[in-house]
Structures are given as structure tokens and as C-alpha cells.
Image (spheres, rainbow, N blue to C red):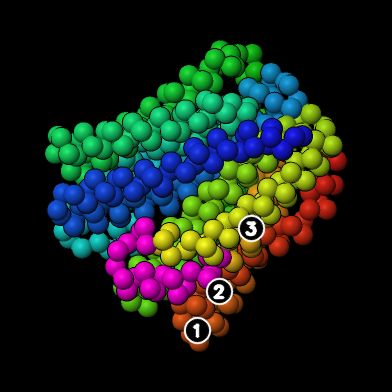
Amino acid sequence: MKYREYLGIAIPFIISTVTQPILGAVDTAVIGRLGNSSYIGGVAIGTVIFNTIYWLFGFLRVSTSGFSAQSLGSNSEKDTFFAYLRPVMVAIIISFSFVILQKTILKGALNIYKPEDFVLESAVDYFNILIWGAPFVLIGYVNLGWIMGRKLIKETLFLQISTNIINIVLDLVFVMKLDLGVKGVAYATLIAQFYSFIFGYIIISKRIDLKKVLIYSRDLINKSEFKKIMGVNIDLMIRTACLLIMTNMFVARGNQFGANILAANAILFQIQYIFSYLFDGFANASSIFAGKALGAKDYKAYKDTLKVSNVFTLGTAIFISLIMILFRKPIISSFTDINSVIEISNQYSIWLIIFPLVIGIGLVYYGIFSGISYTEPVRNSMIISLFFFLIVYYIFVPKFGNHGLWFAFIVFSLGRSVFLFLYKDKLNKRFLNN
């Protein structure tokens, strides 16, 4: 594999994923211009609810991408068909469960977040509209994963970016022109979700004949294959649950240090999200190349994937850290003009210089392990990392405050890399024995 070929896959994925935080920023900016804080709070609560739900089930995209890449390598029409239809069946069951249980989900979420009365109405309006998008979102994850796994780069890029542009334009029209408020933001997102689902389906239907479901129906419902799929998905869901626990504990504890530190942590966390998106582009590329190599039984291509992934991971980590060393003050200032928050953010920005160096391997190897559907190490590494995070959290935070909190975060990030890297020999054996 040539480095140029790898970058040809990674860069479009980076571009497409970076559009996600931009969309969130536009949602907040649009609703923030209505002059009513309850609207902002309502959208924030609703967004947290859906982000938590969809983040937990984001494995549908990751696992499907791996199975799709494997079918690309094997060049089997049957495998290609099953790589799409089986995850779709799982997505349909999960998404319609959300719709049926929507009142229970909303009640449980409101009991957890307990918004004030003036925020409650906006949060309920937002939720009641967007819950109907659950089938579009989860099946859309499968669509996107399958498209990515087939190395359809232009289609992936266009699908992601066009969806977000449609969402942003509808935000402006519904909220600023039609004065629909929170409901306008929700309807804009719902329509964009439906568009993404339909457009993804069109892309896929041009490449596989979905009418052949009758031909393959006998093998489609295969207990052992579904057991394999669900095993992968459950491992990835546990992985995400560990990440959610860590993130929520970090945010909750930061809140106890006062408004300025909370704001500073929020800015630094947004910056680390951007860093993570960069590594995600490489993770997605590595996942596809590893999965394709497995499907083709090409051990050399797999080893080349490891080599190229290591080079770009290390190079990107060093580059990002240097950027933070040289430009951290202007980067932080671009997020706020409040001097006290800028000063505090700069004080703790040392941890963002360290972050890329400790997280890179964990994120990119997550893609490789997922690409060959060997997800037990991903699950185990996150559980162990969370264990060490909790130890550091309860020992160092009381003594060192916010620095202790960021240290716990770095330990968690380092654990993700170290404990997953330690499985590399087993990964090699798993590939050879598959």
C-alpha cells in the first residue's frame, strides 16, 4: 500500500467528520439569536438525550464498515448483500423500539437532567419531533458504514457534507425566517436525517440488487452470523458506555470547580474533540484497508496497513502537539473573548499538548480492530482504562483539583492506546486464523 493511497481515503473521511461539530455550533448560534435562554437550554437538553442514545448505537456504522470492507476484499456478492441487510435488520428493531418507548425514554431523561420549568417545554418539543427520526438515523448509520466500507469516498463525502448543509440552511429558514423557534431546529434536523437516509439508500441500491433478498432469504437469518454481528456490536456498545461514563464524570466534576473553570474545560474539550476527529479519519481508513485485507486473505496488505497507520498516527500526533505549543493562545482565544476564561484555559492547555501523543494509537487501532471484527480487545481496553481513570480520579482530583481531573483524563486516553496495542500479537494471530 502506498502512503498516497492511504491519504486518499483518510483525508475525505476527516473532512466529512469535521462537519459534525460545525453543525452543532450553527444550531446553537441560530437558536441563541432568539433572545430566550430557555430555547438554548431546551435544545441543549434535547441534544444531550439524542447524542447519548445515538452515541451508544454508533457501533452500527463502525461494525457495518468492517463487514462491508471484508466483503469488498472477498468480492462475494452474497457477503456484500449480507454486510448491508443484517445490520439494517438490527437497526430497524432498535429504532422502532425507541419510537414505541419514547414516553418512557423522555420521562427517564427528564428525571436525570431535571430542567427548570421554562426549559422543560422547549426540551419536550424538541424531543417529540426528533424521536421520529430514530429509524432514519440508525439505518443511516448502516448506510454510511456500508458506503465507507466499499471505499466510495466521493459518495461518503458528498452524503455527509450535503446533509449538514441542508440542515444548516433549513435551520436558518425555519428559525430566522419562519420564526418556528425550537420546533424549527428540530424539523430542520429531522428533514436532514430523512434526506441522509434516502440518499444513502439510493447510493447502495445502485450497487447491490436488493430484490435478491428472496434468493438469499434462507441464509439471511443465520443464527451464528447474527451472533457474530451482535457480539461485535455489544463489544462496541460497552466501549462507548465506558467513554460516556468517563466524559460525564469529567464534566460533572468540572462543574464543581466554578463557572470559569467549567467554561475553560468546555473549550479545551471542544479542541480535543477536533483532534480526535483528525485521528478518526485515519481510523476509518485503517478500518477499511484492514477489513479488505481480511476479506482477500492478504496478510501482506494487512501488515502494510499497520505500518502506514503507525507512521501517520505518530506524525499526526507530533504535528498536533507542535501546533498546540506554538498557537495554543490564539486557538483558545478564538472560542471566547472573556479574559478570565482565556487565562484559565491557557493554564490547563498543557494537557492538550500531551493528549495527541497518548490517544493516537488508541483511536487508530480501534479502527483496525473493528475493521477485522475483532472487538473484544477494544471492549477490554476501555474497561481497563476506565478502571484506572476511576483510581486516578478519586486520588488525584481531591488533591490537585482541575489538574488532577485532566490527569485522570490523560491516564484514560493513554490506557486506550497502551492496552489496545498490547493486543497486537493476538490481532496478527486472529487475522491468520480467520
Give x and y (percent) for residue 339: 31, 71
Camera-side residue of 176 and 389: 176
Confirm or deny contact between disc 2 and disc 1 (CB under 8 A). yes
User: Does 280 appear above or below 4?
Assistant: below
Q: Amino acid at mark 2?
A: Phe
* First of labels 3, 2 by sequence position: 3
Q: CA distance from mark 2 to mark 1?
A: 9 Å
The answer to whether 106 appears left or right of 94 in the picture is left
Magenta segment? 333-353
Residue 400: mark in rendering:
1
Vertical relation: 237 (above or below) 431: below
114 falls in the magenta region: no
Say above or below: 275 vs 215.
below
Could you say where residue 430 lies in the image, as x and y percent from the top left? 81, 45
The one nearer the camera, 336 or 38, is 336
Q: In the rendered image, which quarter contains the C terminus? A: top right
Q: Earlier in the sequence, mark 3 or mark 1?
A: 3
Q: Amino acid at mark 1?
A: Phe
The residue depicted at 64 percent of the width and 37 percent of the height is 7
Q: Provide the major secondary structure of the magenta segment.
A: helix
Q: Which quarter of the figure has residue 308? A: top right
